[in-house]
Image (cartoon, rainbow, N blue to C red):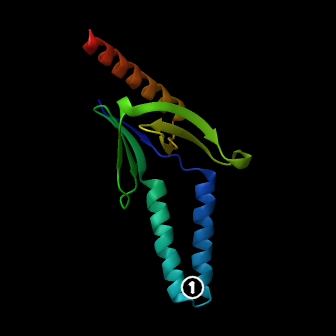
Amino acid sequence: MTRTFHHRFTLGAKCGLVLLAALTIYLFWEKEVLLGSLVVVFTVLVMERVLHSEYVFREGFLEIHRGRFARRKSIPLMEITSCRPMNTTFGMVHYLLIGYGNQRFVAVQPEQEASFVAHLQSLLADEDAAEGGDEE
């Protein structure tokens, strides 16, 4: 069964995009076309990543899509060892840190965090039950 969770559009991301847009307008106002064009390209890349990131549970894997221009990461559910909520300095950014494999980590920011964790735990429990059933 496939389940998709979208990336959380945080206040920090919104502020960052507004600042980049303001910088772009300022650079074009000052006739800095080359620099303004570079900031436009960077703004589009950031916006693409923020708006089109998603986390998909599919057939024993967690697939992390970070926009159309980034590589997709696929993590087998059997390799996931931990999922911890984390905060950055001053609590500005909240994310889930997923540990997998041999001391590897990935940060995710799903929009419905509690539902994401509950679904991950149920899938991991199902994987453990299936693994235990195979050994007998």
4 vs 12: above or below: above
40 vs 123: above or below: below
Query: Residue furthest toward the front?
Result: 102
Which residue is more in the foreground, 1 or 107?
107
Query: Residue furthest toward the right?
Result: 90
Q: How many numbered discs sit on the rendered protein?
A: 1
Secondary structure state at the residue bearing disc 1: helix
- Percent x, y of residue 70: 38, 58
Which residue is more in the foreground, 38 or 89?
89
Query: Residue furthest toward the top?
Result: 136
- Find residue 1 and report its image quarter: top left
13 vs 8: above or below: below
4 vs 126: above or below: below
Residue, x 59% and y 50% (percent of image)?
A: 10
Query: Residue furthest toward the bottom?
Result: 31
Tell me the quarter of the image containing the C terminus: top left
Which residue is more in the foreground, 134 or 23?
134
- Percent x, y of residue 100: 44, 36
Asked if residue 124 lies left or right of residue 109, the reply is left
Asked if residue 46 lies left or right of residue 22, the reply is left
Residue, x 31% and y 18% (percent of image)?
A: 131
Q: Which residue is mark 1?
A: 28
Which residue is more in the foreground, 93 or 82?
82
- Find residue 19 and report its image quarter: bottom right
- Percent x, y of residue 122: 42, 22
Identify the amino acid type marked 1.
Answer: Phe
Residue, x 36% and y 58% (percent of image)?
A: 68
- Percent x, y of residue 109: 52, 43
Residue count near mark 1 (Cα–Cα under 10 Å), binned few <14, some 14–19, many ≥20: some
Residue, x 37% and y 19% (percent of image)?
A: 128
